[in-house]
Image (cartoon, rainbow, N blue to C red):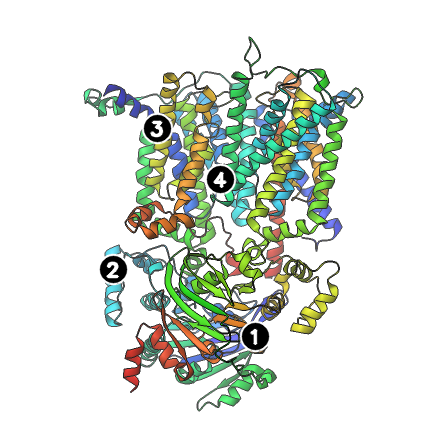
Amino acid sequence: MNRDSLLAQIGWVCAALGLALFLTILVAWPAGAPPFETIYVLFKGGVSSMSKIGRVLAGWVPLTLCAVGLLVPFTARLWNIGVEGQVIMGAIFCTAALRPYDEGGALQIALAIGAAMLGGALWALLAGCLRVFGRVHEIFSGLGLNFVALGVTLWLIFGPWKRPGVASMSGTQPLDMSLWLPRLGKLSVSWVGLALAIAATIFVYILLYRTKWGLKMRAVGENPKAATLFSLGPRRRLLQAFMICGALAGLAGATQVLGVYHRLLPAISSNYGYTALLVGMMASFRLPLVPFICLFFAILNVGSIQLPLQLGLDSSLSGVIQGVMVLSLFIVQGLRLWLRQRKEAD
Amino acid sequence: MIVLNDIHKHYGRVRANDGISLTLEPGRIYALVGENGAGKSTLMRVLAGHTRPTSGTLEIGGETISHLTPTLAREKGVGMLYQDPLDFPAMPVWENFQLGAPKRSKQEVVDVIGELSYRLDACFLPDEPVSSLTVGERQLLELLRLLDLGATTLILDEPTTGITPEQKQDLFDLLMKLAREEGHTIILVTHKLSEAFEMADSIFIMRQGALVATLEPPYDEKELVHLMFGDAADGEVEALPELPPKDVTPRLTMRDTLFAGPKYSMGDLNFTARPGECIGLAGLDGSGQELFLRGLCGLDRMPGGGFDLDSATYRSNDFATLRKAGVQFVPADRLQMALFPALNLMEHITLAFPDKKGDLTDFYQSQCVDGFNLRAHPDTQANELSGGNQQRLLLSLIPNDTKLLLMEHPTRGLDAGSARQVWNHLKSRCAKGSTLIFFSPDLDEVLEHSHRVIVFYDRAIAAVVEGDDISMEVVGALMAGKSMEDIKENNS
Amino acid sequence: METFGLTLAAILVAGSPLVLATLGETLTEKAGIINLSLDGSILLSAMAAFVVSVTFDNPWIGLLAGMAVGAAIAGVLGIIGIYLGQSQLAVGFILTLLCRDLAYFLGHNYSRQPGPDLGLWSIPGIGDVPLIGPIFGSQSPVVYLGLVAIFVCWWWMYRTEGGMRLRAVGESPRAAFGRGIRVRLVRLYYCLAGGALIGMAGAAYSLAVKPGWGRPQGCEGAGWIALAIVIFGGWHPVRAALGAFFFAGLQVSGIYLQEVFPSIPAPVFQVAPFPMMILTLLAVNLGRMGWMQDIVRRHPFLKTFSKGWSIEAPAALGQDFDPKKGL
């Protein structure tokens, strides 16, 4: 893969983008969407004003937290599909930690953030134990627990935590403003959230590539059987990988509760977990690319809100484009592989 | 008649077959000899249609073709029997037999199997899964299948590994019959010269991808060895080191030990080993020797009994504890089980010696390059190393003060020179006091390098032999299930 | 008796799409390919089936459209996974998310619209027969499709030469190649066939079990349950189908239990299939755990029990095979 010249690699990336564009137009056409106008509305909806950029950044924070978190289990060749549920669990723990407080400050917020990370880590640990001790593939345990977390959220919102007099999909009692994360100027994103996302990225980078812990995790991912022979304790490390990812996902849940919605709602995770998996796949799990792809996906997400209003289209189009982009990447990768094999055979 | 013309097969820069031409005539038995890595299996896979040559042609039955496919090969009557039979373990015998053959009903297949079994004095139950058969039976089934498909050219790739000497004799008798009476062409791929001498009308010798000679009887062993190994043939293997006196504290004492693996368990194991002993394990696949090794190091469970290591008693076999206590396990499958393919040598050293801090370049130099002759840049990835270098790497990762070294097939896939170096190294470890327990499917290797041999049969220790009893006749018979008394009776 | 019959009838209807999806995935996985796009595939084919049946005012054409969409998605997975050498799990996962979003995007205008459904078939005379009457007297055609599919899959897999080749390819592609079988083509073929059954399942949802299209669609999450049932069923069509009906039974009884225990919140019943899924997968692995094996060894009479309990996946499940590399 690295043997191709830089020019050839850029060429392949352009091919992937071109394919993505073509496929997007192809699938959007049956819906009667004028292709170029649709793309214009999408991007304009994401970057055309400062307030929109603020929303983009607010979406970038949880997405980046989840995506860099996913790099850790992926180093051990694990698919932490349960990341969506871990975000939700983090949000639940965060809300739970603040229930006793009508108002507060930095201390309560820090407490809530800690609780969220704990919640996410524990939920991930559950999926990890099912995998390591129960040999239940993390796809099933992760997904199952995602749905369970959603169920717990619904139960809480319509049950014990329902707003007095009203039980609705709009969530629990909103938090007092003193418990909100401080904003960045007039933008709707919190500088605390941004700082946390950047710190998490740096933390994961150092952890995976600059420490012995990271080397051992890579070894476990390369060959778990050999890792046992080297007394690396692969099972313990797999659980650690799950927990670190869960903690970062829980942190993302906290930013959603404290910085964006200021309460718990059913859609608190906004699909960020699943989208983060797409980001990871698109970046081929290379850390430097992750924050940029997250930004791109966040622009698409915010921009797609304009689609129903301006063009009468469903906002799922952003998800479609994201999926098409990653798929195109895989197709192009596959074609490269196929061509290289044909060359070698001759 | 089959002619191979200038066959080349390249894998990237590796030239597995470098311009080989040979002729095969019907009714003759050929041996294709060469050490591991010489390219014999590759060449035969070209002939069987399982691989396409990079260039060259094949002439079969008067027709010249550039390559074969499995279907074409079958039509031309060529069939290949792999060392590890290429069958479907989870599927029943009759389906294994029928797959790939022209359409028949189940009853017809059962009848054919019955008839062939009768002629060859074998017994196959059509509905039993193939996984319940021994390796020798699976081989025989494959052979029957190839004959049923009309194979007139039979290629057997290392067929005698993992079968008893008795089964081997039956196989060879059958091959003789097929060649002499039915006019089939038989090609025996082997690295064992004794088999070649015994059977072959003609011996092809391959070395490093090329056909270096074709010999006719009478065979001169010295000449053959020299052609096979080149200059490396003149290496000497060290003798077994002397054992310490009997009153020294035993290294290993097993008391009524019970080991349980994923497929079966094995109990009432009692055995004692001294420091510096080389102990070989012999037995057919699945007889218990793998579980024995894996249980001693802690990879498989020990639900009952216990064992002593020097003076310390162990009632449970936790892998990490035992490893710290000086028990090391080296699996046969290096890249799949013991190394990290995409990690480089320096990273392996870092992981294997966690107590050493800081820059390990000097340590790498002294441990790997000087100590084990591993001449490779520290940045090389494990999957880029040759088989011999992989084994050198593995051995260099074992601490020098290992008390009990457990090895599954120390020289698997190695050329003769590397294999010799490995054994010299292992013997020097024993001379310094380590105890070695190893298994090899190659009975000659077990017999040559052991002070004592534990023979396994049917998931139990059949006997422990030493001294003059360490011979092919005794050990082979024990492996096949005969008792010691019967063997002694037969001999006297 | 009457209620019992009606309950069984409800289980049959609720379970048939799940049975179809499970059978389709069983075929695909038996050949060695994992089609993780199952959940999204069901949604997209459900939408396509509904839209086409509305457009042509004929639910049967809609059914065919659903099958075509299911096969097409599986075909994309097949080509990228089998011929272009990319990870089946990764591509399948991308497709499941993509198809889900695509279904909601393209189905936007058809949300909450009325449309034709497959109706009910009555077998004359049976309606009055006790026990069978309530079940088959007037039943949705998808039930019959499901039952026929179970039989056809079983018969094909275990009683035909083609089925033998299917199993061979999933067990050992190298050995199959050595027997002259075109491994990749066979795998692609069963990918498509499995996809068609999955598409039929999606159509069964939007044209029979829960007619119509909306957001969120009722069958969300069913695909993941089906994937688990394939494992639970030991990759055997009849066993897997029984597993699917068992799950459907749980869901139907969940509806009744909800009425009996109104204090237990609704979400508990909605998400109940998923912890059940995890528990069944745990149970399936029970036989492999060390402590369990110790117990069986100490009580040999449990051996017969554990034999039926254990399952073996197709040995080459999820593994790549490239005939150009030869053997």
Mark 4 on the same chain as mark 3: yes
Looking at the picture, which amino acid does disc 3 mark? Gly
Residue at x-position 34% and y-position 75%:
B478
Determine the residue positioned at 57% across, 50% down.
A234
Q: Residue furthest right?
A: A185
Marks 2 & 4, CB-CB < 8 Å contact: no
Residue type, mark 1 in image? Gly
Q: Where does the C terminus of chain B fall, quadrant-wise?
A: bottom left
What secondary structure is found at the residue carrying circle 3?
A: helix
Mark 2: secondary structure: helix
Q: Which mark is residue B433?
A: 1
Image height of B93 relative to C119, above or below: below
Q: Which mark is residue C249?
A: 3
- Is the residue at mark 1 from the same chain as the one at mark 2? yes
Give whichever of A191, A309 is nearer the camera: A191
Separation of marks 1 and 3 at Cα, in angstroms: 66 Å
Question: What distance separates the C-alpha of mark 2 from that of mark 4?
Answer: 38 Å
Residue C74: numbered disc? 4
Question: Can you see residue B115?
Answer: yes
Q: Which residue is mark 2?
A: B110
Q: Position of residue C124 (x, y in %)?
A: 22, 22
Residue A292 disc label? none
- The amino acid pointed to by label 2 is Val
Q: Amino acid at mark 4?
A: Ala
Give how far apart the Cα atoms at labels 1 and 2 are: 57 Å
Q: Chain of mark 3?
A: C
